[in-house]
Image (cartoon, grey):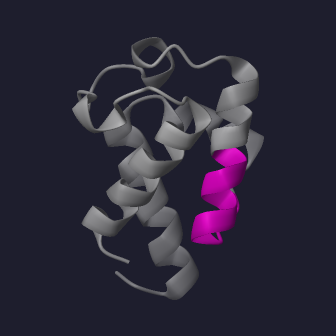
Amino acid sequence: MSPDAIRAVLIEEIRRAVPGSTPEALPDDRPIRDEVDIDSMDFLSLVTALHQRLGIPIPEADYGRLDTLGHAEAYLAAQVAAKTGER
C-alpha cells in the first residue's frame, strides 16, 4: 500500500471519528487530538477503524505513535509493510 493510500485512509477515518473536522488540513507535526479536538473514546474508535481498514494490529502500547499525522502515517506504513513483506 502506498504512503498516499495510507494517508487517505488515515484522513478518511479521522473525518469519520470526528465529523465536521478537516483532517486534510492538519499539519504533519501537530498533535491530532489537539488539532481536531478528539476525545479518548473517539481516538479509540479511530484506532479500531484503522486496525480494521488496514488489517494490522495496533497494540495499546503503540497508541502514542499515532500522535501526529506524520507519525501516524509512518507508523501505519511500517506496520502495513511488515504485514505484507514490503520494504
Task: Say which of 16 and 35 sits in front.
Answer: 16
Q: Which residues are magenta?
A: 47-57
Residue 25's place in the image compared with 30, above or below, is below
Task: Say which of 20 and 4 sits in front.
Answer: 20
**1 magenta-colored:** no
Secondary structure, magenta segment, majority class = helix
**55 magenta-colored:** yes
Q: Is residue 25 left or right of residue 45?
A: left
Q: Is residue 46 left or right of residue 60?
A: left
Quadrant containing the N terminus is: bottom left
Q: Residue 79: where, in percent of width, then height?
A: 52, 65
Residue 66's place in the image compared with 86, above or below, is above
Residue depicted at 67% across the width and 59% down the height: 51
Residue 40's place in the image compared with 71, above or below, is above
Q: Residue 43: where, in percent of width, then height?
A: 65, 30
Residue depicted at 48% across the width and 87% down the height: 85
Residue 58's place in the image compared with 83, above or below, is above
Residue depicted at 41% across the width and 63% down the height: 77
Task: Say which of 43 and 59 sits in front.
Answer: 43
Quadrant containing the C terminus is: bottom left
Q: Residue 23: where, in percent of width, then height?
A: 35, 34
Residue depicted at 68% across the width and 28% down the height: 42
Spot the residue most to the front: 20
Q: Residue 86: where, in percent of width, then height?
A: 40, 85
Task: Report the number of discs.
Answer: 0
